[in-house]
């Protein structure tokens, strides 16, 4: 089930009704918003249950390689099997390496009339300019707190728990549903937030902070928790609720966290060094 994104779905439905479907589309927005779900729904509305005419490409070992794109090009060179179109969805398209991105230009520069390419990404700006400029972009935004809470309650979640999850999922239905399906993740998150409070306290010696960082195995997952916590604080501040941080401090921390996540996910930088620098800054 798709939660939210009514405007984007309306735009896509209008494309189908008018018969003016772009040959290449970029679904761009934060992780966990449901972009892939919308892409799959869009594809199904176009080709029905003709799964043989749908190709979904996922990263292999954290990367989308040129061989995967070559297979796609070969598929697109053939006629649809039973539908009017062949559709390919590349999930986490920002993980295409440079060779893969250059290879996909062949599809973008020489489109066939019966193929549709959809790139789904959390980091659209990391794609090559030559790729982005040849695609119709559909931007996805966080879903409202109310929509997520309502959906969680419809799934059997208690009101207080639905509010807590909706708040720290920060508009991302996929994240909210993951927490609802595994309450141990909520306990884990609470524990990590407690550790964060100790970690950024002025009373904690620097060497203790660095010792903690050395033990971190999945920095991206941890940084996402920290980011969601301070985003939730931002929402509370905007709503007039009291927090232990000034608005300027919250904004500074959010900026540093977002920069750190960008470095870790999009470059080959030393992750431990990024975390050490982050802790000093916040």
Image (cartoon, rainbow, N blue to C red):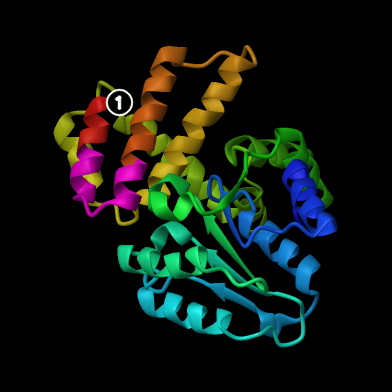
- Of residues 280 and 43, the one drawn nearer to the viewer in this rendering: 43
* Badge 1 element: loop
* Residue 40 inside the magenta-drawn segment: no
Q: Which quadrant holds residue 67?
A: bottom left
Left or right, 126 with reference to 150: left
Can residue 157 be seen here? The reply is no
- Of residues 3 and 247, the one drawn nearer to the viewer in this rendering: 3
* Residue 274 inside the magenta-drawn segment: yes
Asked if residue 16 is positioned above or below residue 172 in the image, the reply reads below
Left or right, 68 with reference to 209: right
Q: Position of residue 107 (x, y in %)?
A: 50, 69
Q: Which residues are magenta?
A: 261-276
In the displayed image of the protein, which residue is found farthest to the left? 207
Q: Position of residue 116 (x, y in %)?
A: 63, 67
Can residue 265 be seen here? The reply is yes
- Of residues 46 and 229, the one drawn nearer to the viewer in this rendering: 46
Placement of the N terminus among the 4 image quadrants: bottom right
Residue under pointer 1? 282
Q: Position of residue 186 (x, y in %)?
A: 56, 47
Which residue shows up at 57% across the image and 16% down it?
237
Q: Position of residue 155 (x, y in %)?
A: 80, 54
Which residue shows up at 66% across the image and 53% down it?
177
Placement of the C terminus among the 4 image quadrants: top left
Asked if residue 70 is positioned above or below residue 201 in the image, the reply reads below
Q: Which quadrant holds residue 19?
A: bottom right
Asked if residue 248 is positioned above or below residue 270 in the image, the reply reads above
Dominant secondary structure of the residues highlighted in magenta in the image: helix
């Amino acid at each position: 089930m798709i939660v939210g994104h009514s405007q984007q779905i309306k735009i896509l439905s209008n494309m189908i009704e008018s018969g003016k479907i772009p040959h290449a589309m970029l679904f761009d927005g934060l992780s966990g918003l449901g972009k892939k779900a919308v892409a799959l729904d869009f594809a199904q509305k176009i080709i029905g249950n003709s799964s043989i005419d749908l190709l979904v490409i996922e990263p292999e070992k954290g990367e989308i390689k040129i061989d995967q794109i070559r297979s796609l090009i070969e598929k697109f060179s053939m006629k649809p099997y039973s539908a009017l179109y062949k559709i390919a969805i590349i999930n986490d398209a920002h993980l295409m390496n440079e060779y893969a991105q250059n290879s996909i230009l062949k599809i973008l520069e020489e489109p066939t009339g019966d193929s549709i390419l959809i790139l789904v990404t959390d980091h659209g700006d990391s794609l090559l300019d030559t790729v982005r400029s040849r695609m119709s972009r559909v931007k996805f935004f966080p879903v409202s707190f109310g929509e997520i809470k309502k959906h969680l309650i419809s799934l059997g979640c208690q009101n207080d728990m639905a509010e807590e999850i909706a708040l720290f999922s920060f508009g991302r239905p996929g994240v909210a549903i993951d927490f609802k399906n595994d309450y141990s993740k909520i306990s884990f998150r609470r524990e990590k937030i407690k550790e964060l409070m100790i970690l950024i306290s002025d009373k904690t010696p620097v060497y203790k902070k660095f010792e903690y960082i050395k033990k971190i195995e999945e920095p991206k997952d941890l940084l996402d928790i920290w980011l969601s916590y301070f985003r939730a604080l931002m929402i509370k501040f905007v709503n007039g609720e009291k927090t232990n941080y000034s608005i300027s401090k919250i904004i500074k921390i959010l900026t540093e966290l977002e920069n750190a996540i960008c470095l870790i996910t999009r470059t080959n930088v030393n992750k431990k060094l990024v975390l050490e620098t982050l802790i000093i800054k916040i």
